[in-house]
Amino acid sequence: AKRIAEDMGKELEIVKTEWDGLVPALTSGKIDAIIAGMSPTAERKETIDFSDHYYTSELVMVVKKGGEYENATKLADFEGAKITAQLNTFHYTVIDQIEGVSKETAMESFPSMRVALESGMIDGYVSERPEAVSASAANENFAMVEFEDGFETSEDDTAVAVGLEKGSDLAEAINETLAGISEEERQEIMDTAIQNQPAAQ
């Protein structure tokens, strides 16, 4: 966001918005762009446009450290586990790929899932790698499970892009900025952002 604003000669203004309010904020003109780890899914593309991808992540599971799922390596290891994911994300739909799983009600936010995991209400939640790194760094009782053979996803689901109003004239300039950021630097920016995440409450 900083780099894009800089290249466009604009002053960056971050507008704190709930996840479900992002698209309405964009379409109503309250914000000019969504830079919040949003995937350019077919469903979202019906309402808004997207820039080129700026990051591609993988799906992982956040579980209790020292618990029975910490050493899981494949989806089948979560048979019988109580698993959830964030409401209105594709993360919740992929839970269906785990045979015999207990799919719990989707939750509003990552902080609420962290609380549910800590209290034993759930055994784990699906997230993308950056959130899982952040969660396990912020809470020593959490561990991240990376899969050798994990969820089947499409690139549109795991890639993230800048959300823009339909026909936005910002698209070209944003794509130009993104094209000038190398893969290494993107990873570096993301890793720095993760380290700067506030600790889980």
Image: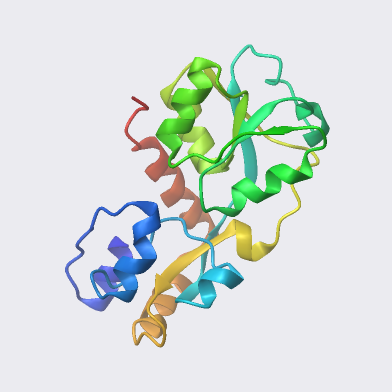
Q: Is residue 47 left or right of residue 103?
A: left
Where in the figure is residue 136, as x and y percent of width and height? 50, 26
User: Which one is nearer the viewer's eye here, 164 or 81?
Assistant: 81
Name which quarter of the figure residue 144 lies in.
top right
Residue 163 vertical placement versus 115 (above, below): below
Give the residue displayed 60% in from the left and 72% down from the top: 42
Q: Is residue 63 left or right of residue 1?
A: right
Q: Residue furthest top?
A: 66
Name which quarter of the figure residue 124 lies in.
top right
Residue 154 vertical placement versus 143 (above, below): below
Is residue 54 at least partly visible in the picture? yes
Where in the figure is residue 72, as x and y percent of width and height? 75, 25
Image quadrant occupied by the C terminus = top left
Q: Is residue 198 left or right of residue 147?
A: left
Is residue 33 at least partly visible in the picture? no
Give the residue displayed 62% in from the left and 60% down from the top: 157
User: Which one is nearer the viewer's eye here, 94 or 182?
Assistant: 94
User: Which one is nearer the viewer's eye here, 190 or 22?
Assistant: 22
Q: Residue furthest front?
A: 105
Q: How many marks?
A: 0
Residue 145 vertical placement versus 53 (above, below): above
Name which quarter of the figure residue 56 lies in.
bottom right
Where in the figure is residue 167, as x and y percent of width and height? 40, 88
Give the residue displayed 48% in from the left and 66% down from the top: 161
State the colouring used for the structure image. Answer: rainbow
Give the residue displayed 39% in from the left and 56% down from the top: 20
Image quadrant occupied by the N terminus = bottom left
Where in the figure is residue 125, as x and y percent of width and height? 59, 34
